[in-house]
Image (cartoon, rainbow, N blue to C red):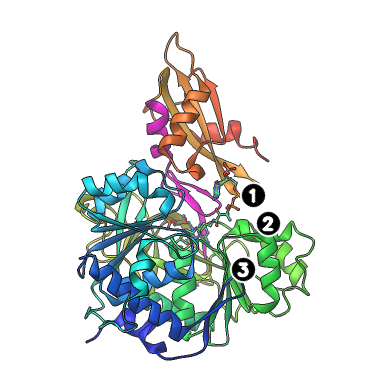
């Protein structure tokens, strides 16, 4: 029975004794051992009563077992729904409810909080801890090491990834097997990956970058990964001499440049550094080359589209640009009001079309229709320009979004929490430049007439409701928010006023 995602990325490595994962404790996991464990996890999952097409919500730390869980979902035809480990119970409740997840897999530390929520919403729970312990692997351990792969087609859904929206409500982006496979195939070729590659993996595995771009490319070619639990400068510096390639957000590269141990000699074995998820400053690009001799390859993607553009592997990697549309991806710049295509050299909204583009937002037909045109073009919300050589530069955003250290924060979601606090009349949340995270979150508050705002209480409420990376790093009280004649808050005025707070 065919299942393109499983067969291509996983089944093709059956029986191989080559190393797939190098783990921080010195252990290695071969492809054969990984696939045995994948089959056991698939049995454990189906033993809990889940069926092909069910959503499996997963909030667990990064581990080899977490990867086996992802692979097991592919083998059993389940929809993998990874969730940021920073999300609060309040945030998770929304994702479980909205997705209609049949099973929630979480860290043991979260079990007490999440089990009642899952039960209320009709989902089962199981645990998976950072060290691989927990009820999921306990059930998997006694299962057979082969599992009959569930038949799926390339148009079947493989994953839901939630992305926040301008209204504050997160949307589940539905990704098919074809979306993931086509992009992995393209990137493998464009970036010249082979089974000799050793990818230093320090990204989280609940987002497209760390989960699909990095891991699926490795699986596509049968390469290996130095699989670090998170980005830690010491661990990355220790791993680089054994690695050939690394993918990261700009913060990874600025943190490495801040360390004198990061030198050309240390990176002599490397052939490729990829950056994405947030703008890489041209200064960082230049400093990186001066220090190491390597030119970072910057690419541009989105949760809804996987990767859209990339600087060339062999040609000119231009600082400040995100390169050229990938083969199979059509990209155009349009007028945001009329939707008309603009000539090269003019700034407009970026639209993309291709096998990489998602199938829409789960149970949100209006939002899908607003962003995904009937002809298949997806309106990214990014503003860009194409130069005479076809290179794309992102020059701004047509969406109110902050990207901090590669994590997206939609100001509306934070504003809704701030506005609900006693004494707060209204708020505006803006992103301001930050030396480490690129941008960081600032909350501007206006008090109700005669009221005073208890900042400690406001921050406590924020902490209860929102993941840490969304928290304002400072709150500023003002008498009134600047507004234009239409009454719209002028965030650019606020950004001008407070833009240098952290630099
Ligand atoms: C951690 N904190 C953050 C962030 N990360 N705050 C704001 N922004 C962040 N990104 C919090 C921590 O909880 C901590 O809070 C404090 O900030 C400082 O933590 P620190 O130890 O410095 O952080 P860290 O644990 O080292 O993490 C920073 C990081 C990490 C390594 C940059 O955020 C990261 O791995 N980012 C990658 C995100 C990513 O993969 N994005 C891809 C999205 P406290 O001080 O209270 O303890 S996919 C995507 O965007 C598309 C498809 C694409 O194109 O790729
Ligand atoms: P997400 O919703 O997490 O998938 O984030 C996607 C957004 O990240 C895009 O719409 C862009 O705004 C931004 N992004 C991704 N890669 C880059 C890049 N190389 N340069 C600038 N912005 C980027």
Would you call the spot at circle 3 few (<14 residues within 10 Å), some (14-19), or many (20 or more)? some
Quote the CA–CA distance across marks 3 and 1: 23 Å
SS at badge 2? helix
Residue 266 at x, y percent in the picture: 75, 73
Q: Residue at x 37, y 43 (%)?
A: 89
Q: Residue at x 50, y 19 (%)?
A: 454
Q: Nearer the viewer, residue 155 or 122?
A: 122
Would you call the spot at circle 1 few (<14 residues within 10 Å), some (14-19), or many (20 or more)? some
Residue at which label 2 appears: 255
Quote the CA–CA distance across marks 2 and 3: 21 Å
SS at badge 1? loop
Q: Decide: marks 1, 2 in contact (CB < 8 A)? A: yes
Image height of 415 relative to 237, above or below: above
Residue 261 at x, y percent in the picture: 78, 64
In the image, is the residue at mark 1 within 8 Å of ligand 1 by its beta carbon?
Answer: yes
Where does the N terminus fall, quadrant-wise?
A: bottom left
Q: Which mark is residue 357?
A: none
Counting the numbered discs, the total is 3
The magenta stretch is: 392-420
Q: Is residue 433 visible?
A: yes
Q: Which mark is residue 318?
A: 3
Instruction: Point out the tag, 3 or 1, that comes first from the N-terminus.
Output: 3
Q: Nearer the viewer, residue 322 or 53?
A: 53
């Amino acid at each position: 029975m065919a299942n393109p995602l499983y067969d291509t990325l996983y089944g093709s490595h059956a029986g191989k004794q080559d190393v797939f994962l190098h783990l921080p404790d010195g252990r290695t996991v071969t492809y054969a051992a990984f696939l045995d464990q994948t089959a056991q996890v698939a049995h454990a999952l189906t033993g809990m009563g889940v069926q092909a097409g069910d959503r499996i919500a997963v909030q667990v730390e990064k581990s080899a077992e977490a990867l086996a869980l992802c692979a097991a979902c592919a083998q059993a035809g389940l929809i993998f729904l990874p969730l940021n480990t920073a999300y609060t119970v309040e945030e998770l409740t929304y994702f479980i409810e909205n997705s209609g997840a049949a099973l929630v897999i979480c860290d043991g530390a979260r079990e007490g909080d999440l089990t009642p929520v899952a039960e209320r919403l009709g989902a089962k729970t199981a645990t998976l801890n950072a060290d691989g312990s927990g009820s999921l692997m306990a059930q998997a351990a006694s299962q057979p090491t082969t599992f009959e792969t569930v038949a799926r087609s390339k148009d079947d859904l493989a994953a839901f990834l939630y992305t926040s929206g301008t209204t504050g409500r997160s949307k589940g982006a539905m990704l098919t097997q074809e979306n993931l496979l086509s992009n992995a195939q393209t990137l493998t070729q464009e970036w010249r990956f082979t089974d000799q590659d050793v990818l230093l993996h320090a990204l989280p595995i609940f987002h497209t970058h760390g989960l699909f771009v990095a891991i699926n490319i490795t699986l596509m070619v049968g390469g290996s990964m130095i699989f670090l639990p998170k980005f830690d400068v010491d661990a990355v510096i220790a791993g680089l001499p054994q690695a050939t390639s690394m993918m990261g957000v700009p913060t990874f590269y600025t943190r490495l440049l801040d360390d004198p141990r990061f030198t050309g000699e240390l990176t002599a074995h490397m052939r490729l550094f990829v950056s994405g998820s947030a703008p890489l400053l041209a200064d960082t690009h230049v400093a990186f080359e001066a220090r190491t001799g390597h030119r970072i390859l910057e690419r541009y993607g989105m949760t809804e589209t996987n990767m859209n553009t990339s600087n060339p592997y062999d040609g000119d990697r231009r600082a400040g640009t995100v390169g050229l549309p990938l083969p199979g991806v059509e990209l155009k710049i349009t007028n945001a009001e009329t939707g008309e295509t603009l000539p090269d050299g003019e700034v407009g909204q970026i639209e993309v079309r291709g096998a990489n583009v998602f199938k829409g937002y789960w149970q949100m037909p209006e939002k899908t229709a607003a962003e995904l045109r009937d002809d298949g073009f997806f309106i990214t919300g990014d503003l860009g320009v194409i130069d005479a050589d076809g290179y794309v530069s992102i020059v701004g955003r047509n969406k109110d979004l902050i990207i901090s250290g590669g994590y997206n924060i939609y100001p509306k979601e934070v504003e809704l929490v701030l506005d609900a606090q006693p004494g707060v009349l209204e708020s505006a949340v803006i992103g301001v430049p930050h030396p480490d995270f690129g941008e960081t979150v600032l909350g501007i508050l206006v008090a109700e007439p005669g009221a005073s705002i208890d900042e400690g209480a406001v921050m406590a409420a924020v902490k209860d409701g929102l993941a840490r990376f969304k928290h304002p790093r400072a709150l500023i009280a003002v008498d009134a928010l600047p507004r234009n004649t239409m009454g719209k808050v002028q965030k650019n005025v606020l950004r001008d006023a407070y833009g240098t707070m952290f630099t």
